[in-house]
Image (cartoon, rainbow, N blue to C red):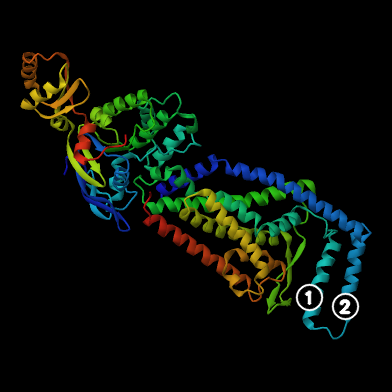
Amino acid sequence: MTELYNLLYNESEKIIKKKKLLVLIGILIILIPLFVYASERQYSAAVKILGTDDWRVSLQKEILEDQSRMQNVGRSEEWKKWLEIKIKQQQYYLDNDINPNEPGAPTFTRTFIENAVSLFIPLLVMVVSIDIVSSERSDGTIKALLTRPINRWKILLSKYLAVLLFSAVVVFLVCFLSILISGIFFSFRGWEAPILTGFKFDNGQLITSDVTTIPQWLYLLRVIGIAWFVSICISSISFMVSVIVRNTAAAMGIMLAALIAGSILVGFASTWEGAKYIFSVHLQLTDYISGQMPMISDVTLGYAILILSLWSIAAVFISFYTFIKQDIL
Amino acid sequence: MENNTLVVKNLSKSFGNRKIIDDVSFEVNKGEIFGFLGPNGAGKTTIIRMLVGLIKPTEGKIYISGFDVRKDYKKAMSRLGCIVENPELYSFLTGWENLMQFARMIGLNDENKILEIVNLVKLDQRIHDKVKTYSLGMKQRLGIAQALLNDPDLLILDEPTNGLDPAGIRELRDFIKRIVKFRNMSVFISSHLLSEIEMMCDTVAIIHKGKLIKQSPVSDLLEETQKVSVWEISDVNKGIELLKKVSRNVIQISDTTLKCEIGKNEIPEIINMLINNDILIYNASVVQESLEDLFIRFTGEETND
């Protein structure tokens, strides 16, 4: 146990001393204010279009419209229930004097992570983990590492744990900096605002029977949880690529291609069934809880998680198998 | 077996159908400096990588201090210190951080001991600088320091003088002799330079095309080398005739010089003979056949170095 702790300490020291985390924080500190500024522009543009800056008036109007729609005969029970929830949500905003469109730290962070979960966060995680083995190989330090009285699997395990640890650190940094920077710019309010969730899809039909509202902080926690899960999968797959490919630049290229290919293939997935077995088309997991129609019909949240988990487990297995058997030339 | 720090038995390695290493066996005794000699590409590095557990042998056994490298990997490795090819160090860490990395791996947390080794390799002035600012000689010494952290019985150095300047080579040589004396360990040094092995080692093994072609004490090998005499005389043609009576292999090197294999005791006889035949002697010298020549004689090939 002490041995494993020492090894993990070593790996962490190497990751930190390579200053990659600092670069990463630098990237976030530059990009997040950009996004914050962009969403501020969007908000003020929306206000201009509405013609009124009194959001209470427009919200009141919306509630009235929905209520009249509920009176409509011929509508299904389910539809009425869905409207009821929507009215409740809008009423909450009105009662608590929350402008639903006004950006605050929790709202900004939620939308930021929802947008970042399929490409931006995977890229950051990949950058941290991709050279964990390949750099030791290209620097030749692997020879010093593997001629110690420690079994190879233990060395590799410490590297995998380090990768998992630092991918969690990346997710934490993204959330923390996003809340901090947007909070300073907008406000730190909006944690209790109700968010709709519980959407289901059946054969391309949106089923709203289980839709409820949960407070935004809980919703945000779920989104962060999803981002963390995605980062675990990405770091596992990057880890495998790092073990197999000797050259760090080539390894990074492979991961980059896989991630981008995923985001392109999502568009084809409605016609090509096979795409649903590729890990990188499933990274936009937040869509399942926010009620967006998934690109691939009959894929559920559970199915996407299953595919990602299988990929990760296979990646870790292949990593250990090749690393232990390999001749270090 | 107890006296052998390293035992290699019938070691072979094939990559696909190609046999890179073919049935190599040798032993390294306690406290000796063992030279592992061969031209580039002879298979030295492949054998070393098998010794330190980086490559699995196709056949054969390796024992370090009695422990089988494959079956008793951890115990065998705990008795070993090595630098395979270039010193492998983390250039983005300081020398001290590098040593701490390796110390943590063997569970060593006695900083005084690490300091002692730092002083031994004379890096105390620069140990807290980043390794990327080190000269090759300093990296080499830091590499040796990390190899000594676990008090090994056997130190394996692969081409340790590669890229060092003459002063650095001399320093390294003195250093290795010193640590062997003080720490009573064995050192295994590979090299493609015969002069180096001749100056440093007690025993030498010569490897060529994956096969061990000779193993003997360096002194025996030197004794085996033949004496050659070189004669600069006035009449070469007459000289050849005369020399052929007492010696084998008489070769004319230039217009005025002859070379022949001969023992020391025959030299006065030849001198008398030449003088009696009115041949003038400008110069006569006895040279020892170098290990280079010896190597060519063993392998039948020129080395490129």
Front residue of B168 and B148: B168
Task: Name which residue lies at 36% across and 29% down.
Answer: B117
Task: Name which residue lies at 41% across and 55% down.
Answer: A323
Residue B66 at least partly seen: yes
Q: Which residue is mark 1?
A: A82
Q: How would you rate the neighbour count of disc 2 (Cα within 10 Å): few for under 14, some for 14-19, many for 20 or more? A: some
Kind of residue indicated by mark 2: Arg
Counting from the top left corner in percent of width and height, residue B273 is at 6, 17
Kind of residue indicated by mark 1: Trp
Under circle 2, the secondary element is helix
Residue B152 at least partly seen: no
Under circle 1, the secondary element is helix
- In which quarter of the view is residue A304 placed? bottom right
Name the chain letter of the residue that bears numbered label 1: A
- In which quarter of the view is residue B230 placed? top left
Which disc number belongs to residue A69? Answer: 2
Front residue of B187 and B21: B21
Above or below, comparing residue A140 to residue A231 in the picture: above
Q: How would you rate the neighbour count of disc 1 (Cα within 10 Å): few for under 14, some for 14-19, many for 20 or more? A: some
